[in-house]
Image (tube, grey):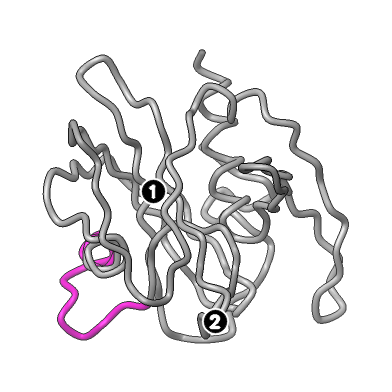
Amino acid sequence: MPQLGPDPHKLSPRIPENPRRAAVGVILWGDTAGARKLVLVQRGFGAPQHPGEIAFPGGMVEALDRDLPSTARREVAEEIGVQEGLWELGCFPDGVAKTRIRFTPVFFRWEEPQPRFVTDRELEQVLMLPLAPLLDAPWSIEHLHHHGQPFDAPRLQLQMEGWTVPIWGATAYVLKAWLDVLRSIA
């Protein structure tokens, strides 16, 4: 079971303070030979939440969502226009975002031969990162304090088209835990 702390039912040491829930879609794109790329988004620099950050598409549960995977599917459709062909693989343990909201990572397999995205106004771009280099990526651990509580958080400095952008926070917890699982079974 993926975990970075002493609790096997959550990814991060933070405690949620907001009773609302959220879900993110972790999309593994590939073909019949297997997953080859990971779909991430870069939030728009003017977005109300997490401006400019690299993240998984996702958001808050709404009243009509049947469950957390339904929330992730709806958010993926709204944010990047992917509405069909997603095969649900399962969920990871919950994490807590810096906004202190509990979220559930929902994993999907997507075999669309010609990936196309329609982004909403809150996104800068959609990224399709090859999986192989991510498995050997040089992760670091940041020692942070938040609300007087010390904790360690993973961080990856991602090189993209001549500039460096960090993957950190909730996205890093999910991505690193998943990559750790892949490395342990390879």
Q: Quadrant of residue 68?
A: bottom left
Q: Amino acid at mark 1?
A: Val
x and y, in percent, of residue 170 in the image: 59, 60
51 or 74, which is in the foreground? 51
Q: Is residue 164 above or below residue 89?
A: below
Left or right of 128 on screen, residue 111: left
Mark identifier at residue 42 = none
x and y, in percent, of residue 8 in the image: 56, 48
Q: Which residue is mark 1?
A: 26
Please report the residue visible at 34 percent of the width from the left and 52 percent of the height from the top. Answer: 106
Q: Quadrant of residue 139?
A: top right
Please report the residue visible at 68 percent of the width from the left and 56 percent of the height from the top. Answer: 168
Mark 2, Cα crowd under 10 Å, few <14 / some 14-19 / many 20+, is: few
180 or 19, which is in the foreground? 180
121 or 154, which is in the foreground? 121
x and y, in percent, of residue 94 in the image: 48, 59
Q: What's drawn in magenta, residue-wise?
A: 60-73
x and y, in percent, of residue 137 in the image: 68, 30
Q: Which residue is mark 2?
A: 46
Please, what secondary structure does the residue beneath circle 1 have? strand
Q: Assess whether residue 115 is covered by the magenta stretch.
A: no
Left or right of 176 on screen, residue 68: left
Q: Is residue 98 above or below residue 129?
A: below
Please, what secondary structure does the residue beneath circle 2 have? loop
Please report the residue visible at 22 percent of the width from the left and 63 percent of the height from the top. Answer: 77
Q: Assess whether residue 70 is covered by the magenta stretch.
A: yes
Please report the residue visible at 61 percent of the width from the left and 51 percent of the height from the top. Answer: 173
Left or right of 175 on screen, residue 143: right
Mark 1, Cα crowd under 10 Å, few <14 / some 14-19 / many 20+, is: many
Q: Earlier in the sequence, mark 2 or mark 1?
A: 1
